[in-house]
């Protein structure tokens, strides 16, 4: 069986970031992020964009500090500024991977703002993208989820700012990044949690190997992501235009629109309207199936009231009203 020889990634992969004010690379010491570091080091010399590096030590593995210090030495040899960012907060007993991921981005965002960088860059690659799509298939995601990770978008928690999160390697296979590290003489670390099947992603890698044998491998999942993304962009634009034309009234604590206008919407448009207004009013991001159930409830009855994501949603014969739930009143202690 013939296998593809690894290709050498080119620094031109970072070309879409040429207008950045400054980059902050998230480099863990693994082969993916060290390859990103090597590419960015080459790219910065002719782009003129400042590049800094940060390594997050979550305090979860004894070896992590040594890996961060190894990245610091690589950066020093290349003349790149480097910082070790430590997650000192107490660790949760459940949901640790999600909490660690959130902490990582919070630390990176804070450091980027301190530096004056406007773009955080991670080394997510084609294999990561395929795993993300597979994970979202198992969760029943809609087209936005099946599109996978965006190559560039707002930094988590900073959707309204100019701080961006960029993933320039999403079309690059991991094998190519490993080969680049070896060609550059960069020793890299392997995170043992990547093989620990108590975590979801290692479980998906095992499932992915089985599916690949049936034709649903990395390339097929990437094609699915590209097609879902194309459909999502078109659908989002059409629905945004439809929702912008609604005769709606918005206040900081309330959304209101005539019922007849709501009932004239396609169901997908109503689902997205509910998601957007609940997020605006309460900051919550309800799961898609909860939004689908709420939309079906609204469309199926003459008078309906329900709560979701900390919002009260009421539809009667005249109007749809969405507002934040008032805080619960507690009985006085006697």
Image: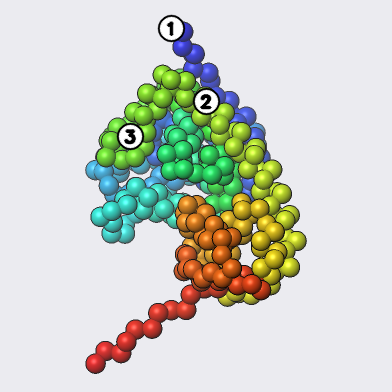
Residue 84 location in percent, x, y? 39, 48
CA neighbours of label 3 inside 10 A, class few (<14), some (14 to 19), many (20+) = some
Taking the image as shown, residue 258 lies to the left or right of residue 157, namely right
Find disc 3 in the rendering and name its residue: 203
- Tell which tag, 2 or 1, sits nearer the viewer: 2
- Residue 220, label in figure: 2
In the image, is residue 156 above or below residue 206? below
Q: Residues within 10 Å of mark 2 (few under 14, many from 20)?
A: few
Q: Is residue 331 above or below residue 194?
A: below
Q: Secondary structure at mark 3?
A: helix
Tell me how far mark 3 sits from mark 2, CA to CA.
19 Å
Q: Circle 2 sits in a helix, a strand or a loop, which is it? A: helix
Residue annotated with mark 1: 1
Mark found first going from the N terminus, 3 or 1:
1
Which is more toward the observer, 232 or 65? Answer: 232
Measured Cα–Cα span from mark 3 to mark 1: 26 Å
Q: Is residue 298 above or below residue 330?
A: above
The disc, 2 or 1, on the residue closer to the chain's N-terminal end is 1
Residue 14, image quadrant: top right
Residue 138: % across, % down = 42, 39
- Residue 199 placement: quadrant: top left
Could you say which is closer to the camera, residue 34 or residue 325? 325
Name which of mark 3 and mark 2 comes first in the sequence.
3
Q: Are marks 3 and 2 in contact (CB under 8 Å)?
A: no
């Amino acid at each position: 069986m013939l296998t593809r020889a690894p290709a050498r990634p080119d620094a031109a992969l970072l070309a879409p970031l040429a207008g950045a004010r400054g980059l902050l690379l998230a480099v863990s010491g693994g082969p993916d992020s060290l390859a990103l570091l090597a590419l960015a080091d080459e790219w910065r010399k002719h782009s003129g964009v400042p590049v800094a590096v940060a390594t997050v030590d979550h305090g979860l593995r004894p070896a992590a500090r040594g890996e961060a210090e190894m990245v610091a030495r690589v950066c020093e040899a290349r003349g790149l500024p480097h910082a070790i960012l430590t997650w000192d907060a107490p660790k949760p007993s459940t949901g640790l991977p999600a909490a660690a991921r959130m902490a990582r981005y919070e630390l990176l965002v804070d450091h980027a703002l301190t530096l004056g960088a406007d773009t955080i860059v991670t080394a997510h690659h084609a294999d990561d993208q395929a795993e993300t799509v597979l994970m979202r298939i198992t969760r029943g995601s809609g087209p936005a989820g099946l599109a996978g990770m965006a190559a560039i978008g707002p930094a988590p928690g900073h959707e309204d700012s100019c701080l961006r999160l960029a993933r320039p390697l999403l079309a690059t296979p991991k094998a190519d990044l490993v080969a680049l590290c070896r060609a550059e003489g960069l020793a890299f670390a392997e995170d043992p949690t990547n093989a620990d099947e108590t975590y979801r992603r290692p479980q998906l890698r095992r499932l992915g190997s089985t599916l690949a044998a049936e034709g649903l491998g990395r390339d097929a999942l990437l094609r699915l992501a590209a097609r879902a993304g194309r459909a999502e962009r078109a659908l989002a634009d059409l629905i945004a235009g439809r929702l912008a034309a609604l005769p709606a009234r918005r206040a900081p604590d309330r959304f209101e629109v005539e019922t007849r206008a709501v009932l004239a919407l396609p169901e997908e448009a109503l689902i997205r309207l509910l998601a957007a207004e609940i997020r605006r009013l309460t900051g919550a991001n309800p799961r898609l199936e909860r939004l689908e159930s709420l939309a079906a409830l609204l469309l199926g009855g003459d008078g309906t009231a329900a709560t979701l994501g900390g919002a009260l949603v009421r539809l009667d014969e005249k109007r749809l009203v969405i507002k934040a739930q008032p805080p619960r009143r507690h009985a006085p202690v006697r």
